[in-house]
Amino acid sequence: MKNSNHTKAESINAIQPTALTDVLDLADIQRFQDLFADVHGVASLITDPKGQPITQPSNFTSLCADIIRKTEKGCANCFQSDAILGRHNPEGAVAQPCLSAGLWDAGVSITVEGKHIANWLIGQVRNEEMDEELYLQYADIIGADKAAFKAALKEVPVMSETRFRKIADLLFILANELSEKAFRNWQL
């Protein structure tokens, strides 16, 4: 009888989550993401490790959602940038200008028991040092309407790089603490 119980305990401990939704409810994830994006003034999306969205976008700017991602080249550049930001990095957030329009974006790996189970992407902010003319040149590169691009660019939140990096660092800690605690509850 003792061996049977030992085997069951080993089997339970051997089970590992393969997705964020294994340890957290999707509605709870979406609600937390929406609130985080709103409070910090950033766009947000959670994806699986391959880059497929788990959640619906939160707080996306019109520039990104309605203009850049609506062009073939802009959308391809966004996906490439998201893949780089979403790479597994258990050391902390990856923050950099996106490879599409150059807005600031960050990616956080969500890891449970050493396994990369999701990415939390934030961003779509510009800082006060960025040159508007460079942004407008990008409109020509992707074939977007320059006037619409310029109008949407003015609506993109402005944030210092320092503040944005602090938000990304906070997100890394919160996301990983939350997922580890949820995993422990899931094990029980």
Image (cartoon, grey):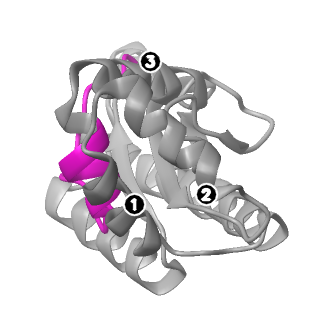
Q: Which residues are magenta?
A: 50-68
Assign the N terminus to one quadrant of the image.
top left
Mark 3, residue position: 14
**Which residue appears at 24% of the width and 62% of the height?**
30
| Figure quadrant of residue 29 | bottom left
The three-letter code of the residue at mark 3 reads: Ala
Secondary structure beneath disc 1?
helix
Mark 1, residue position: 150
The three-letter code of the residue at mark 1 reads: Lys
Prevalent SS, magenta region? loop
Q: Which mark is in front, 2 or 3?
A: 2
Secondary structure beneath disc 2?
helix
Q: Nearer the viewer, residue 135 or 126?
A: 135
Q: Nearer the viewer, residue 51 or 102?
A: 102
| Figure quadrant of residue 108 | top right
- Neighbours of disc 2 within 10 Å: few (<14), some (14-19), many (20+): few
Q: Residue furthest bottom?
A: 39
